[in-house]
Image (cartoon, grey):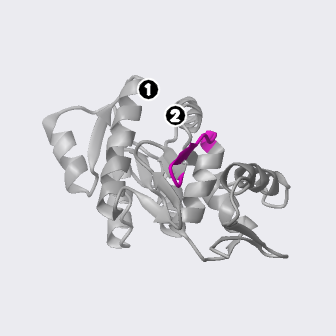
């Protein structure tokens, strides 16, 4: 799943990014409100973490702008302000939750998982294609009755395939959703990870599900 972190304090942003990526999330960073709005409109995020005190455009204004543009991603506000009035202002702007600084990463992660879980439940928690089943809450995958052990990046890649079945996904599309905003899609890392995934998902089965579209990318489909 892909998360946008809008935070102007570089140390805080790096701390959040490292922690979330360690949990298997793909993380993009924006350092001001205007950039956050632009990236939020341009990309399909599963969650947005928004600091309130931002340059160029404050966080509450950024959230309002995103909601006015119809961006549906849940938003978690991050701020040093903790009065009732501040919390109400954040929620009224269109945010879904509120976390005051300083915070422990464990608490942030719990809030993130709760908001992501809410979103996946609204879409239907389990994703099924052919005999593949993916649980985005538990981060587990099965083919038939056999559970498949995937790394965090392999899981993110398969989830992207399963949310877009029978759709040709270019390397650029995969890079932007599964890696991050600045990933160089011309490297062969994507091909390497698709091969890793094929070995675990297709190797022991007659029916292959992950196919190469020569010169374009990959597609999840039944033969």
Stretch in magenta: 143-152
What residue appears at the point 48 percent right and 56 percent down from the top-left corner? 133
Q: Is residue 151 magenta?
A: yes
Circle 1 sits in a helix, a strand or a loop, which is it?
helix
Mark 2 Cα shell of 10 Å, populated few (<14), some (14-19), many (≥20)? many
Circle 2 sits in a helix, a strand or a loop, which is it?
helix
Q: Is residue 50 left or right of residue 207?
A: left
What residue appears at the point 65 percent right and 60 percent down from the top-left corner? 176
Quarter of the rendering containing residue 112: top left
Q: Which mark is residue 16?
A: 2
Name the foreground residue: 5 vs 174. Answer: 174
Residue 147 drawn above or below residue 57: above
Q: Is residue 215 left or right of residue 197?
A: right
Mark 1 Cα shell of 10 Å, populated few (<14), some (14-19), many (≥20)? few
- Dot 1 or dot 2: first in sequence order is 2
Q: What is the tally of numbered marks visible in this picture?
A: 2
Quarter of the rendering containing residue 206: bottom right
Q: Residue 3 carries which label?
A: none
Q: Is residue 113 left or right of residue 222?
A: left
What residue appears at the point 31 percent right and 35 percent down from the top-left corner? 99
Q: Are marks 1 and 2 in contact (CB under 8 Å)?
A: yes
Q: Identify the residue position indicated by label 1 in the image.
A: 105
């Amino acid at each position: 799943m892909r998360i946008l972190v809008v935070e102007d304090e570089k140390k805080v942003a790096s701390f959040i990014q490292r922690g979330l990526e360690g949990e298997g999330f793909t993380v993009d960073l924006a350092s001001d409100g205007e950039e956050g709005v632009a990236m939020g409109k341009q990309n399909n995020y599963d969650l947005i973490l928004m600091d309130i005190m931002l340059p160029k455009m404050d966080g509450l204004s950024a959230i309002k702008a995103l909601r006015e543009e119809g961006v549906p991603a849940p938003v978690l506000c991050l701020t040093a302000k903790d009065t009732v009035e501040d919390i109400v202002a954040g929620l009224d702007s269109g945010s879904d939750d509120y976390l005051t600084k300083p915070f422990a990463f464990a608490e942030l992660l719990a809030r993130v998982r709760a908001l992501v879980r809410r979103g996946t439940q609204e879409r239907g928690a389990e994703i099924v294609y052919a005999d593949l089943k993916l649980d985005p809450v538990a981060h587990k995958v099965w083919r038939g009755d056999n559970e498949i052990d995937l790394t965090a990046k392999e899981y993110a890649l398969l989830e992207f395939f399963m949310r877009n079945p029978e759709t040709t996904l270019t390397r650029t599309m995969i890079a932007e959703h599964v890696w991050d905003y600045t990933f160089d899609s011309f490297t062969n890392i994507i091909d390497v990870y698709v091969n890793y995934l094929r070995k675990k998902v297709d190797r022991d089965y007659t029916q292959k599900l992950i196919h190469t579209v020569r010169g374009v990318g990959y597609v999840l489909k039944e033969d």
